[in-house]
Structure formats: C-alpha cells, structure tokens
Amino acid sequence: MAADPKTRDIGPVILLGAPGAGKGTQAKQMVERYGIPQISTGDILRDHVARGTELGKQAKAIMESGGLVPDQLLFGVVEERLSRPDCARGFILDGFPRTVPQAEWLDTLFSKTGRAPLVIDISVSYNQLLQRLTGRRSCPTCGRIYNIHFQPPTTPDICNVDGAKLLTRKDDTEKVVSERLKNYERDTLPLTDYYGGKKRLKVVKGDQAAEQVTADAFAAVDGAAD
C-alpha cells in the first residue's frame, strides 16, 4: 500500500516557469496533496517587514526606495524560513531561485543536509503565454477573471455575472507583458540549463489541460520521492 503523501519525505521542490505558466496554481495543488508549505520570497519578505525583524527593516528600506533586495539579504531570509519545522518533510519554492548564482547558493545550503532539489519546469510557448497574460480581463465588481482567448464572457467586455464592464490590468498590456517575458528569458531561463546539466530537471508541458499538468507534476514529485 502506497504511503500517505502527507507523511512522506518529499524534499525540496523548485517550480520554474515564465509569468503566466501556472506555477501558482500547481503549487497550491502540491500543498494540498503533500501537506508541505509553498514558499515565495515575496511572502517571506512581507512577513519579516510585518514582524519588524532586523532583516525586515533592511528589506523595507530598500523596497520603499524602489530598489531590488540584494541576494545576500534574500539568502538570509530564505535560510531562516527553510529552517522552520513545517519544512522538515519538504517545501515548494515558487519564484526562487531566479538566477544561476541564487541556484548555486541554494545547492550549497542543501548540501549541508544532503538533500538535492527536484526542479519542475512548467513549459509554455511564448505565444500562449502572451495570450494568457494579455487576454486577461477582470470584473471590478465581483472579481471574476476571464480570458478573451480561452474563457471569454458571453458578451464582449461585459461580466456574465453582474453586467459590469471588464477591466485590463495595467501589467497585462502587451508592452508590459513582453518586457516581463524578456526579463524572464534573460535572467531565469538559464536555470533550466543549470538544473538540466545536474540531471534534476523535469519538464511538464503547461499548455495541456490544468488537470493533466497537475497529474504530470504529481508524477514527477512521486517518482523523485520513491
């Protein structure tokens, strides 16, 4: 009889994928199945700022000035978070590492515990990412999300639920989306080569039905944990 996924030692799982690839959706599915935490550096930093820790004070000053939080500060907050008891069986890193130097630091950290990460890359074509992100529309009243390419409202630009005019977020314009995708390709895409070279990378096709993407991601985690 297979062990309960919520009691197995899962280890570190790193989710890679461009903006719009569906990392957040898949991370939530993994949290539910395996009972391990989803960890993002944004959430960690906000927690430190809210608690008024020394790290939080430093991060707040940098973020309020519009700067990027330097790696050495990020490393401190990530290491502290991963040392907490809820990470003992494993955890899901979403949005970190973003660069090869960050991945190299993580490998050094994991080597202390003898745990190598499983890296899942949710791969989606550039054109579909563009359609997913630029096609998003939201209802300002009820919050319902549509996509004019994949899940359009019955009447163009009008919410099915309450008839409100749908809005496009400022960061979903084609110009902004294209810039975000270029930044991803420049900074984060090299991680697939890095982890691929270490034989830790599992590629999951993200342009399938969401249920199939989830099934493939679960299969990758279950295979690595066996």
Image (cartoon, rainbow, N blue to C red):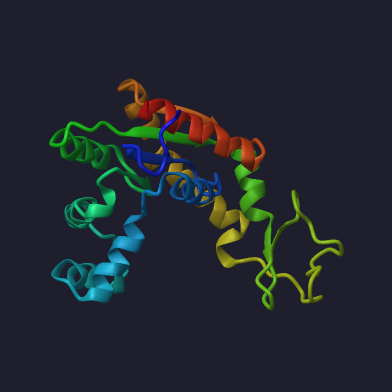
Residue 54 visible in the displayed image: yes
Question: Which residue reaches farthest right?
Answer: 155
Residue at the image point whose x is 37% and y is 42% from the top = 187
- Residue 225 is drawn in which quadrant? top left
Residue at the image point whose x is 78% and y is 69% from the top = 159
Image side of residue 60 versus residue 112, left or right: right
Q: Is residue 36 positioned above or below 145 on the image?
A: above
Image side of residue 142 versus residue 39, left or right: right
Q: Is residue 131 positioned above or below 193 on the image?
A: below
Pick the residue in front: 19 or 114. Answer: 114
Residue 124 visible in the displayed image: no
Q: Which quarter of the rendered picture does the N terminus lie within?
A: top left
Image side of residue 172 versus residue 194, left or right: right
- Residue 89 is drawn in which quadrant? top left
At which x and y percent is residue 214? 56, 39
Pick the residue in front: 1 or 204. Answer: 1
Q: Is residue 25 positioned above or below 113 on the image?
A: below
Question: Which residue reaches farthest front?
Answer: 1
At which x and y percent is residue 82? 23, 50
Pick the residue in front: 113 or 16. Answer: 113
**How many numbered marks does the figure carry?**
0
At which x and y percent is residue 221? 42, 33
Residue at the image point whose x is 27% and y is 38% from the top = 103
Q: Which quarter of the rendered picture does the C terminus lie within?
A: top left
At which x and y percent is residue 158? 81, 69
Residue at the image point whose x is 76% and y is 74% from the top = 165
